[in-house]
Amino acid sequence: MSGFDVTVVGGGLVGAAIAYGLAGKGLKTAILDEGDIAHRASRGNFGLVWVQGKGHGRPEYATWTLTSAELWHDFAQQLQDETGIDVEHSNQGGVFLNLSAEEEVGHRAVLEDIKRSLGNRPYSFEFMDRAALLDWLPGLGPDVVSGCYSPHDGHANPLKLLRALHQAFQARGGQYRPHHPVTAMTAINGGVRLTTPDGDIESAKVVIAAGLGTQRLAAMAGLYAPVGPNQGQLLITERVDAQLKLPTNLVRQTGEGGLMLGFSNEEAGYDTMTRPVLLKNIAWRCRQAFPFIGGLKVVRSWAALRIMTPDGFPIYDRAPEMPGVHVATCHSGVTLAAVHAQRLPDWIAGAALPDDMTCFETGRFNVQAVS
Amino acid sequence: MFRPYRDTDDATVRIHFEGQALDVPAGETVAAALLANGVSVFRTTPVSGAERGPYCMIGVCFECLVEIDALANRQACQIQVRDGMQIRRQAGAVAAVP
């Protein structure tokens, strides 16, 4: 068959990471993307490579996240070698700041649950008082009850990551085609035909990694992959010399010096407008953690839409009715970029999903619908 | 490098750049006033220390940042000159923690 070995539908962080990995296996790969006005969570991301607290009640997700964080250093190095782009990855750990005793108790209980659920897998965290955190986080205020340091956490620049993935993908021979929305999907002999306004594209396999468009596209292949928008807002300050050496759940300092202040979680449909009351609450909480932030100027704020499944966990599945079609979606495109690039390509090439990942198939939503 | 595009006999105000007094047309922006007086380097960057000056002149690019009346990171192209204004170049990132 002419055409591609694999066509990835979606050029955000998830699609680009997978496509980059596929191209690295020597597969002839294309990315079909929308244009600049697409909803693009990858451009609104806070940029954490974050482990602590993820996977409560779903140890497979904690494991998947931990594995990605462990692979991230080499992944970032490889991207830099191939593109010259430094994605500003740091894996020196991260701190979850507790602003009340209740918050600390709750966070500790969650982390202890996760640690227990992981058995022998190392899962480290340490609660520290404010004074012990000041070397890493100068300016931490007296309202901070404690911070939970985890060496597994880190951060990166999501915009540079997206750019590096695209550049590296194309350097590996991948073809990027923007303005190619997929309007139909048809099984053909030996593969799949994708219909776009600019013509049909045939490939042996397809990966749907289209963020909020995933549900519509998966339905074309007979797969129920429910996703919906969850709005997050954040702010960024002027560039300053603040010496914040570690990212936190509230504030992180970017490579250029700006402080990112995060973030809200809101059900707002497809609304991407910021709202002053939410921004005020974010700024207020971050200033509680770091009082000096009250004296800084905010230079930008924005809203973006996370891609949420009903249970908050990713979807990795194949369409039984249309052989060759895969679905991959999640809300942690930065954290999981390393496993998406390094582990999913084998699965897409034909290997079975590892046993501990079959829980991410879509069958779990059908069960819920029945019960 | 720059000259006014029209003759003006408007009132002037006295501003100070790096301690040097400059008489400039009232109503100008800080960026226009400094450029007209031959100032091209307004700051150095926080990351590499490279020199920067005004680029867009419409408040978008944040290249023209200067310290005005002891407050850093102000957009020179968005602020009008005022009599007695003290303007300084800024070097790299400004310390945020007192």
Image (cartoon, helix red, strand yellow):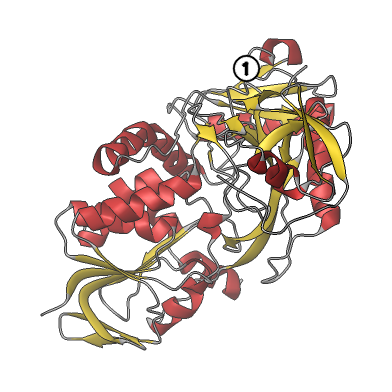
Q: Nearer the viewer, residue B26 or A220?
A: B26
**Percent position (x, y) of residue B59?**
68, 52
User: Dividing the image into 4 quarters, which one contains the C terminus of chain A?
Assistant: bottom right
Query: Can see residue A264?
Result: yes
Pick whichever, A353 or B83, lies toward us.
B83
Q: Nearer the viewer, residue B79 or A229?
A: B79
Q: Which residue is mark 1?
A: A136
Could you tell me which residue is drawn at 74 percent across and 20 percent down? B97
Residue A325 sits in quarter: bottom left
Q: Amino acid at mark 1?
A: Trp
- Image vertical order of residue A235 relative to residue B16, above or below: below
Residues A357 and A43: in front is A43
Q: Which quarter of the image is occupied by the N terminus of chain A?
A: bottom left
Q: Is residue B74 left or right of residue A314?
A: right
> Label 1 is found on which chain of the structure?
A
Circle 1 sits in a helix, a strand or a loop, which is it? loop
Q: Residues within 10 Å of mark 1 (few under 14, many from 20)?
A: some
